[in-house]
Amino acid sequence: MLKSKIKSLAKAYLPEIIAIRRHLHQYPELSYEEVETGKYVATKLKALGIDYQHGIATNGVVGIIRGQNPESKTIALRADLDALPIQEANNVSYKSTKAGIMHACGHDAHTASLLGAARILNETRAHWSGTIKLIFQPAEEKTPGGAKLMIQEGVLENPKPAIILGQHVHPPLEAGKVGLKPGIYMASADELYVTVRGRGGHGAMPQECIDPILITAHIITALQQVVSRRADPAIPTVLTLGKIQSVGGLTNIIPDEVRLEGTFRTLDEGWRQKAKEIMVKLAEGIAESMGGSCTFRIEHGYPVLFNNEALTQQVKQHMIAFCGEDNVVDLPMRMTAEDFAYYSQVMPACFYRLGTGNKALGITSGLHTDTFNIDESSLELGIGLMAWLAVQSLSN
């Protein structure tokens, strides 16, 4: 009966949740700048009569819904608030009003879904026992990550959740389907900032210079060999240098300095640390051997995201019960990263995917693109399933 009630409420509240998602989409805010977004979420929780705290880790909001016997067990549900620095190319009525800022990763849908689930859970709280903590987290898209800051500020205490669940849109899956993977699911992500220094001069007299471009070329080749020759082939590893820029320099001018930026990702925390030590030593050694110098700064990013295996298997069974076995998909590992990983490092966690694609409607663009959009009918499953997983997790 509770499952039928949740499905009925999800269907009834879908138009409102779509309106919330569109409002958030029109007024996106970047990481650590989600001032109005946080206020908007707080206003919605207040209207529902849900207790909340606002301003955690900059602009985060945490709500509390208490069912019967609220001290028996607590679980947490998480959504993220921030947008990306992308100029939207979609021609829709709810297009972003902020130049160069767009909800291109679906965080508007995540926040709307959690607000919808919160309304359902609050309305049905006489039918379940325990406490549900609603975490609306800022700054997922930018290190050090809002999850890390919220944990540091005590979001997982008073009351302490036994588990945490997170939902993320997934364009490759058609609306109406969900997916998940137990165990290691998403990669760590570290940012690389390399400065190579030489001695510039006339391009026709290289013997009087120390060419940082040539040094950089050797460093780039050597760094790629860290992946191809130093990494265990069984450990997925990615090293991408996405930006190279000389400071000065022309067709006939050798510059003094070259700067590199990139990302290093893997699915093994031990290899992650070892690889970073190898990269720094290698780059510095090459630069020195060629007469130059190198500064190699690594900004330590998100850890590996691990879905607790027992919890994820339980979640899968609850998904099948709610939307049918044909609509629950096993997903492969991904080399993308998510700061939900910080929660997964300190407590049982499950991060799952909500299908939002619709090939028939042409809704196929990937995350972090200027044409990203979702089939909004997917939000009915998004809010209903999240509410269902919450009450089932409390009863386990």
Image (cartoon, rainbow, N blue to C red):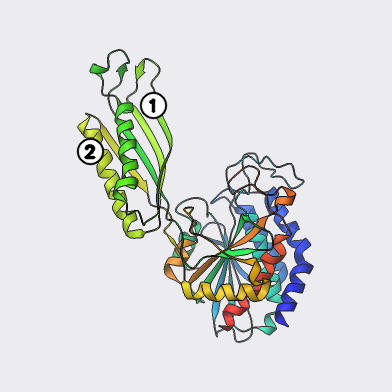
Q: Which residue is label 1 attached to?
A: 247
Which quadrant of the structure image shows residue 245?
A: top left
- Which amino acid, by three-letter code, is at mark 1? Val
Q: Secondary structure at mark 2?
A: helix
Q: Residue 322's x, y, as percent?
A: 67, 74
In this picture, residue 212 sits left or right of residue 46: left
Q: Earlier in the sequence, mark 2 or mark 1?
A: 1
Graded by Cα atoms within 10 Å as few (under 14), some (14 to 19) or many (20 or more), the crowding at tag 2 reads some
Q: Residue 134's x, y, as percent?
A: 59, 69
- Which amino acid, by three-letter code, is at mark 2? Gly
Q: Secondary structure at mark 1?
A: strand
Question: Residue 26 has which mark?
Answer: none
- Who's the residue at 71% across and 55% down the image? 375
Mark 2–mark 1 Cα distance, whole angstroms, equals: 22 Å
Q: Which residue is label 2 attached to?
A: 285
Between 145 and 215, the one nearer to me in the picture: 215
Q: Are marks 2 and 1 in contact (CB under 8 Å)?
A: no
Q: Residue 165's x, y, as percent?
A: 55, 69
Image quarter of the C terminus: bottom right
The answer, for residue 204, to whether it is visible in the render is: yes
Which quadrant of the structure image shows residue 330?
A: bottom right
- Who's the residue at 33% across and 31% down the image? 217
